[in-house]
Amino acid sequence: MPKPVSRILLVTDDRHWTKPACIRLSAAARALDNPLGIQFVAVADSTQALDLMVNDGDVQAVLIDAALGHGAAAQDARTLVRAVRAHRPELDVYLLVQGSRDEAQLAHWLNEPLTGHFHLQESDYRGWFRILHAQLTQRARTPFYDALKAYVAMAKDAWHTPGHSGGDSLRASPWAGDFHDFMGEHAFRADLSVSVDQLDSLLDPKAVLLESQAMAAKAFGANRTFFATNGTSTANKVIFQTLLIPGDKLLLDRNCHKSVHHGVVLSGALPVYLDSSINPEFGLFGPVPKATLFQAMDDHPDAKAMVLTSCTYDGLCYDLRPIIAKAHAKGIKVIIDEAWFGHARFHPAFRPTALECGADYATQSTHKVLSAFSQASMIHVNDPAFDEHAFRENFNMHASTSPQYSMIASLDVGRRQASMEGYKLLARSLELCDELRAGINATKVFRALTLKELLPAAVRKDGVRLDPTKITIDISGCGLTAQEFQAELFEKHHVQVEKSTFNTVTLLVTIGTTRSKAARLLDALQRMAKAHHTPPKRVRRTPSLAGFTTLAVLPRDAYYAHGELLALLDEDDRPNAALVGRVSADQIVPYPPGIPALVPGQRITPEVLKFLLDLMKAHRRTDMHGMVFEGDVPCMRVLTAAEAKKLALR
Ligand SMILES: Cc1ncc(COP(=O)(O)O)c(C=O)c1O
């Protein structure tokens, strides 16, 4: 394993001090234990300091002379502190003070988020080194993962779950031993039970888990962070049930992930669905237009909460600040589903994050973009009125009493990595994204879509940004359908992409994307561009989802109604006219992309039926979650006339 490098930047124009101090700090680093690879670099002004901080991903701490810029250069220590914090909030920032004059000034620094300060006249450089080392060690700690490793090393006999008992049931088995060998010994040794006190409790953390979550909160800029081991799907439901009671009004993007819609059913909320923008040219959904959001907040000032997805699957991020400011002015809580944006805090190219824009809650699938195991997510809370008891009750309702500890450890390590080297890794990802975009466009057949091309017309003026790590490629120039394209890329070139529409595929670049993977992908695209540059075949466009119709019944009431099954087609294979005007009891979700065409309680119109049928014809491989198949006949569960009358919203 390579050793880390931790560069510490000294920023002072006091030349008499710099050279000997640097020599003696470096001597301390050589003489003392230095597992973090601490090195010192001195610069004389803030321009050089900023340059290093931006371009050197190994910088971990900055020591800034409080007197910087008091001379003719007109630099300002305070401006530099703020610039460092704004660019890389994870860094430790110390102030260097000189004598009584600066000491007297320290009171003016109380509002600046400093890690600490040192006296320039002090010559205990070993002491300085020890403090710097201790702070970095603290940031790099992984309390839960450390406790897990320590417990496994204790080799205690297990008289508790899980039944494989540290892998003992498998190791010598002629029938199942291969699974043990494939997964590796530690997968089983670290799979432990809640009976192990040393590993705290996810349902009521008081020790190592509490600490790990607090460290995650600090790293991600939250007041509180909670680890969720059943993905953002569960995280969303927990927040909904915490914030909303039956009948509470909720503003939501109709194209939110299905877990949000499940949260509506579970909480009994009264949803106000907002139609998101659509880019029909590429079959993509975008954000809800700002004007729609603002109007909805004006029309429903009694709404309790609002939920939006930022960034979207395709990487489109809302201009959240004004939206959240308006929501807060109306007393509406804001939940942002950041399932695809967990990396954003660690590089300014992606920021501001939802929390930085003032969101009360943000849910992140850490596993989607950082180094955590699948299903490992985080719930970040900045709500000043956070009701921890209610949250805990709802969290416990959804969380298993037997959480997977390797998943929790991966959240701990994922946070450490993001905090210690996220900036550096993301800078490399961004470089790769630029190279990939240039390489894709150089094929002259494939095209990486720009923000402008991706943006639906309705949100062109809404300040929407693009997360550059989501690369959507227009493949229509190669004459293959998206399915044919994906099959060839997979079979011939061994590349699997994230998702597709009828004429695009989307690549997800993460901190795990390597140069070799990028080179192999570009090579594959060049070969495919050479082989297929026929004029575009007529491809079937994804039918456009009709706007939201009407909510006739509260989703929860519709979902729990008995209902009846009606076929989607009549005997002549035409849309079943008997469905028109009926109320859906289930959520009907074409997958991909997982956005509901109907939610429970929604009135069915001819347009929605046409959409579903067109989609089933155009994309035979689209799953239809919520559709019931009676033999080969697709059916939908709808409310009976009596139920619809009894449950109708007034
Ligand atoms: C916007 C959005 N929210 C939530 C989720 C659910 O996340 P998870 O897979 O972590 O449960 C997804 C999954 O794709 C998603 O796209």
Image (cartoon, rainbow, N blue to C red):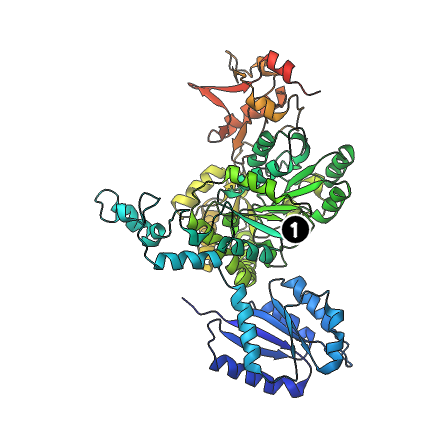
Horizontally, residue 76 falls left or right of residue 568, namely right
Image quadrant of ligand 1? Answer: top right
Name the residue at 54% across, 38% down.
Answer: 501
Residue 640 is situated, as x and y percent measured from the top left of the image, at: 58, 13
Residue 100's image quarter?
A: bottom right
Tell me if I can see residue 445 in this picture: no
Residue 259 is situated, as x and y percent measured from the top left of the image, at: 55, 36
Q: How many marks?
A: 1
Q: Quadrant of the N terminus?
A: bottom left
Label 1: which secondary element:
loop
Q: Is residue 162 above or below residue 150?
A: above
Horizontally, residue 623 falls left or right of residue 151, namely right
Q: Nearer the viewer, residue 361 or 490?
A: 361
Label 1 CB sits under 8 Å from any ligand 1 atom: no
Tell me if I can see residue 277 in this picture: yes
What is the crowding at mark 1: few (fewer than 14 residues within 10 Å), some, or many (at least 20)?
A: many
Residue 137 is situated, as x and y percent measured from the top left of the image, at: 51, 67
Q: Quadrant of the C terminus?
A: top right
Residue on which disc 1 sits: 355
Name the residue at 78% across, 36% down.
Answer: 298
At label 1, the amino acid type is Leu
Name the residue at 60% across, 66% down.
Answer: 91
